[in-house]
Image: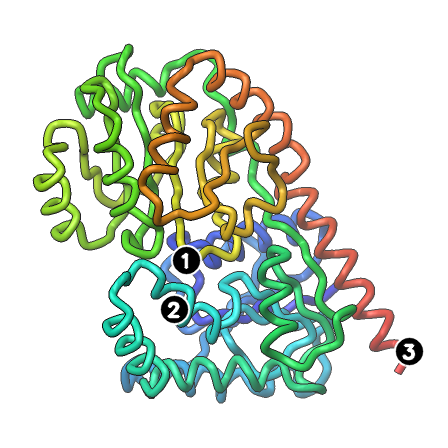
Amino acid sequence: MKIALVHNKYSSYGGTERYIVNLTKGLLKRGHEVHIFASRFSLEPPLGAVTHKVPLINLGRMGKDLSFALFTFNVNRDNQYDIVQGFSRIVRQDLIRSGGGVHKIYIRESLAPIKNNFLRGLKFARRTISPAHWVSRYVEGLGYKKGNHRFVMAVSEKVKRDILNVYNVPPDSVRVIHNGVDLSVFHPDSLGGDRGTIRGRYRIGDGEILLLFVATNFPLKGLEYLLKGMAKINRDDLKLLIVGGGNKRPFEAIVDNLKLKGRVIFAGKQGDLLPFYHGADILVHPTVYDPFANVCLEAMASGLPVITSRINGFSDIVADKENALLLNDPTDETEIAENIAYLLDKSKRLDMREKGIELSKQYTIDTHVDKVLSLYQEIVDLKRGE
Protein backbone atom coordinates (compact mmCIF):
# COMPACT_ATOMS: atom_id res chain seq x y z
CA MET A 1 0.00 0.00 0.00
CA LYS A 2 0.94 3.64 -0.42
CA ILE A 3 0.31 5.19 3.00
CA ALA A 4 0.36 8.82 4.17
CA LEU A 5 0.88 9.50 7.90
CA VAL A 6 -0.04 13.09 8.83
CA HIS A 7 1.05 14.68 12.10
CA ASN A 8 2.45 18.11 12.94
CA LYS A 9 5.82 16.76 14.08
CA TYR A 10 8.01 13.71 13.58
CA SER A 11 10.01 13.15 16.74
CA SER A 12 11.08 10.56 19.30
CA TYR A 13 9.71 12.65 22.18
CA GLY A 14 6.00 12.35 22.99
CA GLY A 15 3.57 9.43 23.03
CA THR A 16 2.00 10.02 19.61
CA GLU A 17 5.36 10.87 18.10
CA ARG A 18 7.02 7.67 19.31
CA TYR A 19 3.99 5.72 18.12
CA ILE A 20 4.35 7.14 14.61
CA VAL A 21 8.05 6.24 14.57
CA ASN A 22 7.25 2.62 15.48
CA LEU A 23 4.34 2.45 13.02
CA THR A 24 6.57 3.79 10.24
CA LYS A 25 9.18 1.13 10.93
CA GLY A 26 6.55 -1.63 11.06
CA LEU A 27 4.95 -0.59 7.78
CA LEU A 28 8.29 -0.29 5.98
CA LYS A 29 9.37 -3.70 7.28
CA ARG A 30 6.29 -5.20 5.65
CA GLY A 31 7.11 -3.61 2.29
CA HIS A 32 4.64 -0.72 2.26
CA GLU A 33 5.42 2.75 0.90
CA VAL A 34 5.24 5.31 3.72
CA HIS A 35 4.94 9.08 3.26
CA ILE A 36 5.25 11.33 6.32
CA PHE A 37 3.63 14.77 6.33
CA ALA A 38 4.87 17.00 9.16
CA SER A 39 5.88 20.57 9.89
CA ARG A 40 8.81 19.63 12.10
CA PHE A 41 11.27 16.78 11.69
CA SER A 42 13.46 16.59 14.79
CA LEU A 43 14.25 12.95 14.03
CA GLU A 44 15.51 11.45 10.80
CA PRO A 45 12.82 9.02 9.52
CA PRO A 46 13.81 5.40 8.76
CA LEU A 47 15.44 4.68 5.42
CA GLY A 48 12.75 4.32 2.77
CA ALA A 49 10.22 6.75 4.23
CA VAL A 50 9.33 9.76 2.06
CA THR A 51 9.03 13.10 3.88
CA HIS A 52 6.81 16.07 3.03
CA LYS A 53 7.37 19.37 4.87
CA VAL A 54 4.08 21.09 5.70
CA PRO A 55 4.32 24.91 6.03
CA LEU A 56 3.05 26.67 9.15
CA ILE A 57 1.85 30.16 9.97
CA ASN A 58 3.82 30.83 13.13
CA LEU A 59 1.22 32.85 15.07
CA GLY A 60 1.06 30.93 18.34
CA ARG A 61 -0.62 27.60 18.89
CA MET A 62 -3.85 28.74 17.22
CA GLY A 63 -2.09 29.85 14.03
CA LYS A 64 -0.04 26.66 13.87
CA ASP A 65 -3.06 24.37 14.34
CA LEU A 66 -5.19 26.23 11.80
CA SER A 67 -2.45 26.44 9.17
CA PHE A 68 -1.52 22.76 9.57
CA ALA A 69 -5.16 21.77 9.08
CA LEU A 70 -5.39 24.07 6.06
CA PHE A 71 -2.19 22.94 4.36
CA THR A 72 -3.00 19.24 4.84
CA PHE A 73 -6.61 19.54 3.67
CA ASN A 74 -5.85 18.15 0.20
CA VAL A 75 -3.13 15.61 0.99
CA ASN A 76 -5.02 13.01 -1.05
CA ARG A 77 -6.46 15.36 -3.67
CA ASP A 78 -5.49 13.12 -6.60
CA ASN A 79 -6.23 9.85 -4.74
CA GLN A 80 -2.57 8.96 -4.91
CA TYR A 81 -2.58 7.28 -1.48
CA ASP A 82 -4.35 4.09 -0.53
CA ILE A 83 -4.56 5.28 3.06
CA VAL A 84 -4.32 8.70 4.71
CA GLN A 85 -4.02 8.40 8.49
CA GLY A 86 -4.30 11.51 10.64
CA PHE A 87 -3.08 12.01 14.20
CA SER A 88 -3.24 15.70 14.99
CA ARG A 89 -6.66 17.12 14.24
CA ILE A 90 -6.52 17.33 10.48
CA VAL A 91 -9.76 17.73 8.54
CA ARG A 92 -9.75 14.98 5.89
CA GLN A 93 -8.35 11.47 6.25
CA ASP A 94 -9.34 7.85 5.79
CA LEU A 95 -8.46 6.92 9.35
CA ILE A 96 -8.31 9.03 12.50
CA ARG A 97 -6.10 7.66 15.25
CA SER A 98 -7.40 9.13 18.49
CA GLY A 99 -4.42 8.69 20.79
CA GLY A 100 -5.01 11.81 22.89
CA GLY A 101 -8.74 11.32 23.34
CA VAL A 102 -11.46 13.92 22.78
CA HIS A 103 -10.38 17.50 23.46
CA LYS A 104 -13.66 18.47 25.13
CA ILE A 105 -13.37 15.56 27.57
CA TYR A 106 -9.69 16.30 28.18
CA ILE A 107 -10.49 19.91 29.15
CA ARG A 108 -12.97 18.73 31.78
CA GLU A 109 -11.24 15.66 33.21
CA SER A 110 -7.74 17.15 33.31
CA LEU A 111 -8.98 19.70 35.84
CA ALA A 112 -9.70 17.00 38.44
CA PRO A 113 -6.56 17.84 40.47
CA ILE A 114 -8.05 21.28 41.27
CA LYS A 115 -10.10 20.59 44.40
CA ASN A 116 -11.48 24.11 44.85
CA ASN A 117 -14.79 24.23 42.92
CA PHE A 118 -14.52 27.94 42.17
CA LEU A 119 -10.97 27.72 40.85
CA ARG A 120 -11.78 24.61 38.82
CA GLY A 121 -14.83 26.32 37.31
CA LEU A 122 -12.80 29.43 36.53
CA LYS A 123 -10.09 27.45 34.76
CA PHE A 124 -12.70 25.45 32.85
CA ALA A 125 -14.31 28.69 31.66
CA ARG A 126 -10.94 30.10 30.60
CA ARG A 127 -10.14 26.97 28.61
CA THR A 128 -13.59 26.92 27.03
CA ILE A 129 -13.26 30.47 25.66
CA SER A 130 -9.54 30.22 24.89
CA PRO A 131 -8.99 30.74 21.12
CA ALA A 132 -6.32 28.03 21.05
CA HIS A 133 -8.55 25.46 22.75
CA TRP A 134 -11.49 26.52 20.55
CA VAL A 135 -9.43 25.90 17.41
CA SER A 136 -8.37 22.48 18.72
CA ARG A 137 -11.99 21.50 19.34
CA TYR A 138 -13.15 22.98 16.03
CA VAL A 139 -10.58 21.25 13.82
CA GLU A 140 -11.02 17.98 15.72
CA GLY A 141 -14.79 18.23 15.19
CA LEU A 142 -14.37 18.80 11.46
CA GLY A 143 -12.40 15.57 11.21
CA TYR A 144 -15.27 13.64 12.79
CA LYS A 145 -17.90 15.02 10.39
CA LYS A 146 -19.45 12.61 7.89
CA GLY A 147 -17.39 12.44 4.72
CA ASN A 148 -14.15 13.61 6.34
CA HIS A 149 -13.14 10.17 7.61
CA ARG A 150 -14.06 6.53 7.14
CA PHE A 151 -12.95 4.93 10.41
CA VAL A 152 -11.64 5.96 13.80
CA MET A 153 -8.98 4.00 15.67
CA ALA A 154 -9.40 4.50 19.42
CA VAL A 155 -6.56 3.44 21.72
CA SER A 156 -8.91 2.30 24.49
CA GLU A 157 -12.54 1.65 25.33
CA LYS A 158 -12.59 4.94 27.27
CA VAL A 159 -11.60 6.87 24.15
CA LYS A 160 -14.26 5.05 22.13
CA ARG A 161 -16.94 5.95 24.70
CA ASP A 162 -15.84 9.58 24.71
CA ILE A 163 -15.92 9.78 20.89
CA LEU A 164 -19.42 8.29 20.74
CA ASN A 165 -20.64 10.61 23.51
CA VAL A 166 -19.33 13.77 21.84
CA TYR A 167 -19.50 13.10 18.09
CA ASN A 168 -22.29 11.74 15.93
CA VAL A 169 -20.39 8.86 14.35
CA PRO A 170 -21.65 5.29 13.75
CA PRO A 171 -20.51 3.02 16.61
CA ASP A 172 -19.20 0.37 14.19
CA SER A 173 -16.88 2.95 12.58
CA VAL A 174 -14.89 3.29 15.83
CA ARG A 175 -12.45 0.43 16.35
CA VAL A 176 -10.40 -0.10 19.51
CA ILE A 177 -6.81 -1.12 18.80
CA HIS A 178 -4.66 -0.93 21.91
CA ASN A 179 -1.11 0.33 21.69
CA GLY A 180 1.79 -2.05 21.25
CA VAL A 181 5.26 -2.20 22.78
CA ASP A 182 8.54 -2.93 21.05
CA LEU A 183 9.91 -5.94 22.91
CA SER A 184 13.28 -5.54 21.23
CA VAL A 185 13.62 -2.26 23.16
CA PHE A 186 11.63 -2.93 26.34
CA HIS A 187 12.38 -6.29 27.90
CA PRO A 188 13.07 -7.79 31.35
CA ASP A 189 16.51 -7.36 32.88
CA SER A 190 17.21 -10.99 33.74
CA LEU A 191 20.86 -10.34 34.68
CA GLY A 192 20.24 -7.27 36.84
CA GLY A 193 22.90 -5.13 35.15
CA ASP A 194 20.81 -2.01 34.67
CA ARG A 195 19.49 -2.18 38.21
CA GLY A 196 22.95 -1.51 39.59
CA THR A 197 23.69 1.20 37.02
CA ILE A 198 20.72 3.40 37.89
CA ARG A 199 20.92 2.77 41.62
CA GLY A 200 24.60 3.61 41.62
CA ARG A 201 23.99 6.83 39.71
CA TYR A 202 21.38 8.05 42.21
CA ARG A 203 22.84 6.40 45.34
CA ILE A 204 19.95 4.01 45.89
CA GLY A 205 20.86 0.96 47.96
CA ASP A 206 20.19 -2.46 46.45
CA GLY A 207 17.95 -3.35 49.40
CA GLU A 208 15.92 -0.13 49.17
CA ILE A 209 12.55 -0.13 47.39
CA LEU A 210 12.51 2.32 44.51
CA LEU A 211 9.30 3.75 43.12
CA LEU A 212 9.42 5.21 39.61
CA PHE A 213 7.27 8.03 38.21
CA VAL A 214 7.62 8.97 34.51
CA ALA A 215 5.78 11.96 33.00
CA THR A 216 6.16 15.41 31.50
CA ASN A 217 2.90 16.82 32.87
CA PHE A 218 3.40 16.28 36.61
CA PRO A 219 -0.02 17.62 37.78
CA LEU A 220 -2.03 15.66 35.20
CA LYS A 221 -0.22 12.41 35.94
CA GLY A 222 -0.83 12.71 39.69
CA LEU A 223 2.60 13.40 41.17
CA GLU A 224 1.17 15.42 44.06
CA TYR A 225 -1.01 12.49 45.16
CA LEU A 226 1.86 10.04 44.80
CA LEU A 227 4.03 12.19 47.07
CA LYS A 228 1.26 12.46 49.67
CA GLY A 229 0.64 8.72 49.47
CA MET A 230 4.32 7.99 49.87
CA ALA A 231 4.45 10.23 52.95
CA LYS A 232 1.89 7.97 54.64
CA ILE A 233 4.35 5.07 54.50
CA ASN A 234 6.90 5.61 57.23
CA ARG A 235 9.86 3.77 55.73
CA ASP A 236 13.21 5.38 55.08
CA ASP A 237 14.10 2.61 52.65
CA LEU A 238 11.25 3.64 50.31
CA LYS A 239 12.55 6.04 47.64
CA LEU A 240 10.97 7.75 44.62
CA LEU A 241 12.71 8.57 41.34
CA ILE A 242 10.89 11.14 39.17
CA VAL A 243 11.76 11.09 35.46
CA GLY A 244 10.48 13.80 33.12
CA GLY A 245 10.90 17.37 32.00
CA GLY A 246 7.98 18.90 33.87
CA ASN A 247 8.06 21.95 36.15
CA LYS A 248 9.44 20.56 39.40
CA ARG A 249 9.40 23.68 41.60
CA PRO A 250 5.88 23.28 43.06
CA PHE A 251 6.61 19.62 43.76
CA GLU A 252 9.94 20.34 45.44
CA ALA A 253 7.93 22.50 47.85
CA ILE A 254 5.53 19.60 48.47
CA VAL A 255 8.52 17.31 49.11
CA ASP A 256 9.82 19.77 51.72
CA ASN A 257 6.42 20.17 53.39
CA LEU A 258 5.95 16.41 53.61
CA LYS A 259 9.48 15.96 54.98
CA LEU A 260 10.40 13.65 52.10
CA LYS A 261 13.71 15.29 51.31
CA GLY A 262 16.34 12.63 50.81
CA ARG A 263 13.74 10.09 49.71
CA VAL A 264 12.66 11.80 46.46
CA ILE A 265 14.95 12.38 43.47
CA PHE A 266 14.16 14.48 40.38
CA ALA A 267 16.11 12.92 37.49
CA GLY A 268 14.88 15.29 34.76
CA LYS A 269 14.18 14.42 31.15
CA GLN A 270 15.77 11.15 29.99
CA GLY A 271 16.15 9.75 26.47
CA ASP A 272 16.49 6.08 27.40
CA LEU A 273 13.91 4.83 29.90
CA LEU A 274 14.84 1.14 29.92
CA PRO A 275 17.61 1.44 32.57
CA PHE A 276 15.14 3.28 34.82
CA TYR A 277 12.53 0.55 34.42
CA HIS A 278 15.19 -2.04 35.29
CA GLY A 279 16.54 -0.05 38.23
CA ALA A 280 13.18 0.50 39.92
CA ASP A 281 10.88 -1.86 41.83
CA ILE A 282 7.43 -0.38 41.10
CA LEU A 283 6.05 2.07 38.53
CA VAL A 284 3.39 4.35 40.02
CA HIS A 285 1.27 6.28 37.52
CA PRO A 286 -1.78 7.76 39.33
CA THR A 287 -2.93 9.74 36.30
CA VAL A 288 -6.18 11.71 36.36
CA TYR A 289 -6.48 11.62 32.54
CA ASP A 290 -4.86 9.17 30.15
CA PRO A 291 -6.33 7.62 26.97
CA PHE A 292 -3.66 4.86 27.16
CA ALA A 293 -0.36 5.40 28.98
CA ASN A 294 2.44 3.83 26.95
CA VAL A 295 4.74 4.20 29.95
CA CYS A 296 2.70 1.53 31.77
CA LEU A 297 2.97 -0.96 28.92
CA GLU A 298 6.69 -0.27 28.51
CA ALA A 299 7.32 -0.72 32.22
CA MET A 300 5.31 -3.93 32.36
CA ALA A 301 7.20 -5.38 29.38
CA SER A 302 10.45 -4.42 31.13
CA GLY A 303 9.51 -6.44 34.20
CA LEU A 304 8.20 -3.66 36.44
CA PRO A 305 4.95 -4.03 38.46
CA VAL A 306 2.55 -1.19 37.67
CA ILE A 307 0.17 0.85 39.83
CA THR A 308 -2.13 3.11 37.82
CA SER A 309 -5.68 4.46 37.77
CA ARG A 310 -8.77 2.86 36.28
CA ILE A 311 -9.34 5.98 34.19
CA ASN A 312 -6.13 5.16 32.32
CA GLY A 313 -7.04 3.35 29.08
CA PHE A 314 -4.20 0.92 29.88
CA SER A 315 -6.58 -0.57 32.47
CA ASP A 316 -8.47 -2.22 29.56
CA ILE A 317 -5.80 -4.87 29.22
CA VAL A 318 -4.97 -5.70 32.86
CA ALA A 319 -6.74 -7.22 35.86
CA ASP A 320 -6.45 -5.67 39.32
CA LYS A 321 -4.15 -7.54 41.71
CA GLU A 322 -3.24 -9.99 38.97
CA ASN A 323 -0.90 -8.24 36.53
CA ALA A 324 -1.28 -4.65 37.81
CA LEU A 325 -2.86 -2.63 40.62
CA LEU A 326 -5.69 -0.25 39.70
CA LEU A 327 -6.67 2.85 41.65
CA ASN A 328 -10.36 3.72 41.87
CA ASP A 329 -9.50 7.32 42.77
CA PRO A 330 -6.04 8.54 41.70
CA THR A 331 -6.43 11.64 43.88
CA ASP A 332 -6.84 9.55 47.06
CA GLU A 333 -3.40 9.40 48.67
CA THR A 334 -4.59 6.78 51.18
CA GLU A 335 -5.54 4.41 48.37
CA ILE A 336 -2.19 5.08 46.68
CA ALA A 337 -0.37 4.31 49.92
CA GLU A 338 -2.31 1.06 50.39
CA ASN A 339 -1.43 -0.11 46.88
CA ILE A 340 2.25 0.73 47.34
CA ALA A 341 2.20 -1.10 50.69
CA TYR A 342 0.71 -4.16 48.96
CA LEU A 343 3.77 -4.37 46.71
CA LEU A 344 6.29 -3.90 49.48
CA ASP A 345 6.02 -7.67 49.75
CA LYS A 346 8.75 -8.92 47.41
CA SER A 347 6.90 -12.15 46.57
CA LYS A 348 3.88 -10.14 45.38
CA ARG A 349 6.14 -7.94 43.26
CA LEU A 350 7.82 -10.93 41.65
CA ASP A 351 4.49 -12.63 40.95
CA MET A 352 3.06 -9.50 39.35
CA ARG A 353 6.29 -8.98 37.40
CA GLU A 354 6.07 -12.41 35.76
CA LYS A 355 2.38 -12.08 34.95
CA GLY A 356 2.96 -8.62 33.49
CA ILE A 357 5.81 -9.84 31.29
CA GLU A 358 3.62 -12.62 29.91
CA LEU A 359 0.72 -10.24 29.24
CA SER A 360 2.94 -7.75 27.41
CA LYS A 361 3.78 -10.45 24.85
CA GLN A 362 0.18 -10.16 23.62
CA TYR A 363 0.60 -6.43 22.92
CA THR A 364 3.72 -6.21 20.81
CA ILE A 365 4.23 -3.51 18.21
CA ASP A 366 4.24 -6.22 15.52
CA THR A 367 0.83 -7.49 16.62
CA HIS A 368 -0.41 -3.91 16.70
CA VAL A 369 0.82 -3.12 13.17
CA ASP A 370 -0.87 -6.29 11.87
CA LYS A 371 -4.19 -5.10 13.36
CA VAL A 372 -3.74 -1.64 11.85
CA LEU A 373 -2.98 -3.16 8.44
CA SER A 374 -6.13 -5.26 8.69
CA LEU A 375 -8.11 -2.06 9.20
CA TYR A 376 -6.25 -0.40 6.31
CA GLN A 377 -7.27 -3.29 4.05
CA GLU A 378 -10.89 -2.92 5.13
CA ILE A 379 -10.74 0.75 4.14
CA VAL A 380 -9.09 -0.01 0.78
CA ASP A 381 -11.74 -2.64 0.01
CA LEU A 382 -14.47 -0.15 0.94
CA LYS A 383 -13.00 2.49 -1.38
CA ARG A 384 -12.72 0.03 -4.26
CA GLY A 385 -16.36 -0.91 -3.87
CA GLU A 386 -17.58 2.67 -4.19
Mark closest to the chain's N terminus, 1 or 2:
1
Real-space Cα separation, disc 1 to disc 2, in angstroms: 8 Å
Q: Amino acid at mark 2?
A: Arg
Q: At 28% across and 37% down in the image, what residue appears?
A: 229
Q: Is residue 274 left or right of residue 223?
A: right
Q: Which residue is mark 2?
A: 40
Question: What sort of colour scheme is used for the picture?
Answer: rainbow
Q: Is residue 240 left or right of residue 6?
A: left
- Where's residue 250, x and y in %? 14, 52
Secondary structure state at the residue bearing disc 3: loop
Q: Are marks 1 and 2 in contact (CB under 8 Å)?
A: yes
Residue 174 falls in image quadrant: bottom right
- Where's residue 132, x and y in %? 34, 83
From the viewer's side, name the closer residue of 188 and 380. 188
Q: Is residue 177 above or below residue 204?
A: below
Q: Amino acid at mark 1?
A: Ser
Q: Which mark is residue 385?
A: 3
From the viewer's side, name the closer residue of 161 and 154. 161
Q: Quadrant of the C terminus?
A: bottom right
Q: Which residue is mark 1?
A: 11
Figure label count = 3
Q: Amino acid at mark 3?
A: Gly
From the viewer's side, name the closer residue of 45 and 145. 145
- Where's residue 373, x and y in %? 74, 56
Secondary structure state at the residue bearing disc 1: loop
Secondary structure state at the residue bearing disc 2: strand
Q: Nearer the viewer, mark 2 or mark 3?
A: 3
